[in-house]
Every structure is written in structure tokens, then in C-alpha cells.
Image (tube, helix red, strand yellow):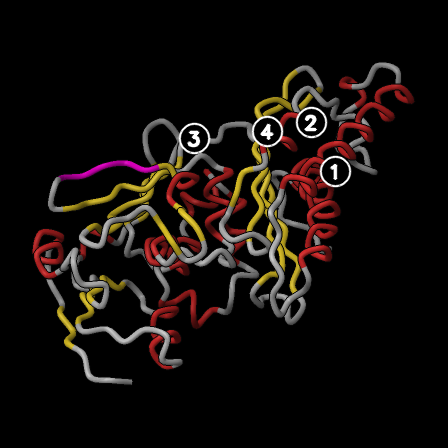
Amino acid sequence: MTPFELAEPATVTEALALLDPADPTVRAVGGGTALMLMMKAGMFQPRRLVSLRRIAQLSHVTATPDGGLAIGALTPLADVERAPAVSHAAPVIVRTMRRLSNVRVRNVATIGGCLAHGDPHMDLPPVLMALGAAVTVAGRGGARSIRVEDLFAGYYETVLARDEIITGLAIPPQRARRSAYLKCTTGSADDWPALGVAVSFDTAEGAIIDPVVVVSAATPKATRLAGAEAALTGAPLAGMVADDVVQDAMVGDDTTRDDVAAGALGRAADAAADEAETMADVRGSASYKRELVRVYVRRAVRAALAVYPTPERSH
């Protein structure tokens, strides 16, 4: 690696003063797990790195009075994984962490850094999008809030200005929403995914309402799929899973509702495959990933019904 300056400010204000909006080689860094790999490979040669590690107020996990979560951007992923407040308010995050890289990376990588990096292969962004999360961003012109689903502009691109840093993450109360994240890897279970699918939805009167479907890794950025969400809206729960997770009280005419549910799930899977702009890479062709989308949207919806709120079953 080429020599570079390392600054370690103690406050957000000091950190912002060290950034240069006109110089792309000056960058803020949290845990640095992804950035260091890019530097070692010669893909990024910084003039100055502004480490945020000494800013103590950016590392915390707090349950909000309404049942949501407030997480500091510098909180290590391992701390998020182990926090009782996260397990209670958003257990899908804990389940996701178990197959997110390895414990050594999770001990160093930060939740703000994984969002600011803009890598479409990361596991948490689609989950946070499905949960309706938003980031708080500080800049010289003041602070602003950005929904995670609006944060990503393209492949390794975000809407953040060069003199802005993520300071926190807010996750709204999930209450009775059901959520799941599944990924398909071509290597080990904790490898970078060829595809990630996150889903979240409410239920009422035996049907799905307000569904969110997000795909990542197979696409240039984590992306919501409006067509799949429309196909799922109003779909009956009966027939979505193979076991007795859906109670008899939710079922009218079993055969009819099973057929309707299977049809809705199939339409959602087809809509997702048609809508997702899949890309080819070392983990598979675009057409292969399109079929993965079709399969994993089905599985993710069923997983959200079958595992909630118990730990995720193996696939």
C-alpha cells in the first residue's frame, strides 16, 4: 500500500472538518474491513483516512420507547448481534448475523460502515430496507435522515456526499411484522452471496398486508421489487407453508385458499424474477440468478411465516 495520512478525530465536528468534498482520496472509515481489502488490492489509494473509532457517542444500541431501535453507526456488528434489544425488537437481524462473514469480521466491522460502503453483496442492507430503517447523516451543512432504501445509488455507490458521514441508524417498531432473510452462496455458508432476499410483511384476517420484498447481491444495488409486493398483497396465509404454522382459524375452504395462496406466491416469484435486474459475475450468470430470485422469494416468504419468531431453520 502507498503511504497515507491517518486522522483520528474525537468528535463528529472534527471528523467533518477533515473531509474534503473535492478530493475522492479522502475518506471516512469505521471498522475498515472492506476498505483495507480494496487498498491491499490497489483498488483504492487514499491520501487521508479519517478514522471514526475515537468518537465514543457513535457506538451504542438503544431500545426506543415506541419499541424501535437506535444504533450508533460505529457499533460493531458483533455488538448488534448480541444486544438483547435487537433480539427482542428485530430478531431477523440476529438470524442474519449468524451467516454474515465470520466472527472476526463482525467484531471489527461497523453497521454504519457496511451501509456507507455501498457493496451490493452485503447481507444487512436488504434486511434493514425490509425493516423500514433509516440512517442519520451528518454534514457540514447540517444533519439529514435517509431511508436505507434510498441510500444506494448504484454499484458501490451511495447518495452520501464526500463530506458526509453516517452517524446512526433508526429501526421503527416492527410489532407483529414477520421478516426473513435468505441468501444463496456458491461457497461456504458465510461467503458472499450470489443472491440475498429479504421480506417483511404484516398479516390481518388471514392474509398478507404491506409486504416488502428486497433483493441484493444478484443486482447492482439492493432493490425493492414492487411487482412482487403487489402480487403478495392480500394473499391468504393458508397454503403458504407446508406445516401447521397457519392456524385453522385462518382457513375457510382449505383447498380453494391453498390454491389461491400457491398462485399468489408463484405470481410474486415470477414478478420478482421479471423485475430484478440481475448481473453476471463469478458467482453465476444473470439468467441463473434470475431463477434464484424466483426460487428464493418463495422460500423467504415461507420462512417468514414458518420461523417467526423462533430461530431460522436450515435450508
Q: Which residue is mark 4?
A: 211
Q: Residue 22: percent from the left, percent from the top?
A: 16, 58
- Marks 4 and 2 sit apart, C-alpha to C-alpha, by 9 Å
Residue 173 higher or lower than 298, as above or below: above
User: Label 1 amino acid?
Assistant: Asp
- Marks 2 and 3 sit apart, C-alpha to C-alpha, by 25 Å
Q: Which residue is mark 3?
A: 173
Q: Which residue is mark 1?
A: 270
- Marks 3 and 4 sit apart, C-alpha to C-alpha, by 16 Å
Give the position of the N terminus as an image quadrant.
bottom left
Give the position of the C terminus as an image quadrant.
bottom right
Q: Nearer the viewer, mark 3 or mark 4?
A: 4
Q: Which residues are magenta?
A: 142-146
- Occupied quadrant, residue 279: bottom right
Secondary structure beneath dot 4 equals strand
Q: Residue 116: percent from the left, percent from the top?
A: 34, 54
Q: Which residue is mark 2?
A: 231
Residue 245 higher or lower than 50, as above or below: above
